[in-house]
Amino acid sequence: MRIGVLALQGAFREHMMTFEALGATSVAVRLPEQLNDVSGLVIPGGESTAISKLMRTYGFYDAIRQQHGAGMAVWGTCAGAILMARTILDALPDQEPLGVMDIDVRRNAYGRQIDSFEADLDFRGLSDGTFRGVFIRAPWIERTGEGVDVLAEHEGRVVAARQRTLLVTTFHPELTGDPRVHRFFLDEVVGA
Ligand code: GLN
């Protein structure tokens, strides 16, 4: 199974290293054609405004929508989760979402005061204990549609959710050294 990691900007290397540690093959995706031979795609954390500009330049919007329609699973972490939303709240003026997942996500939701923090999360779908959430200028998920399952909440806000072959986490599992969410994506979301 090959997993693509969108490698335009942000924390893509850390995702690739975590997949490699699990024995899965990952490829750094820099051109839309590369999506033809992956079963899943990770859109990493970083700066969603920069990633969206580069996605537009290289023609990723249509390619990701099309490949997802043809069965490719997609997991967005942090900036990636913002980009997967139907609506981005507090988006920059010309920042276009992919709109593949029936959620609304608010950018930089925690504001400046507590823009980065860590918290133990009850992540539904992981049987063995809590998961350490690393939040960096994180968004939160403000609305979830009918087909969306909430997987984790923090202080009343949704921070992880899943809609069939789509997964979003507003925190950074690739920065913890704990591969359980990557395992969950491979086992439960890709090929669901
Ligand atoms: N605040 C960033 C954005 O709007 C996301 C931060 C992150 O991915 N760690 O893109």
Image (tube, rainbow, N blue to C red):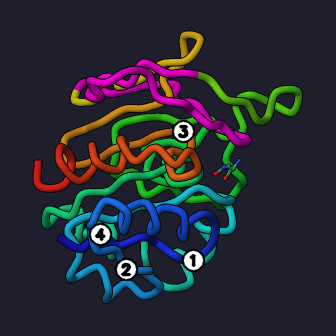
Say what secondary structure mark 2 lies in.
Answer: strand
Segment colored magenta: 120-146
Q: Residue 170's mark? A: 3
Callout 3 environment at 10 Å: few (<14), some (14 to 19), or many (20+)? Answer: many
The residue that disc 4 covers is 3
Q: Is residue 121 magenta?
A: yes
Task: Mark 2 and mark 3 in contact? Answer it, CB < 8 Å.
Answer: no
Cα separation between marks 4 and 3: 20 Å
Q: Amino acid at mark 3?
A: Thr
Callout 2 environment at 10 Å: few (<14), some (14 to 19), or many (20+)? Answer: many
Callout 4 environment at 10 Å: few (<14), some (14 to 19), or many (20+)? Answer: many
The residue that disc 1 covers is 8
Q: Mark 1 or mark 3: which comes first in sequence?
A: 1
Say what secondary structure mark 3 lies in.
Answer: loop
Say what secondary structure mark 4 lies in.
Answer: strand
Left or right, 180 with reference to 10: left
Mark 4 C-beta to ligand 1 under 8 Å: no
Q: Position of residue 74 (x, y in %)?
A: 32, 56
Q: Mark 2 or mark 3: which comes first in sequence?
A: 2
Residue 150 seen in render:
no
Q: Is residue 100 magenta?
A: no
Task: Mark 2 and mark 4 in contact? Answer it, CB < 8 Å.
Answer: yes
Q: Amino acid at mark 2?
A: Val
The residue that disc 2 covers is 27
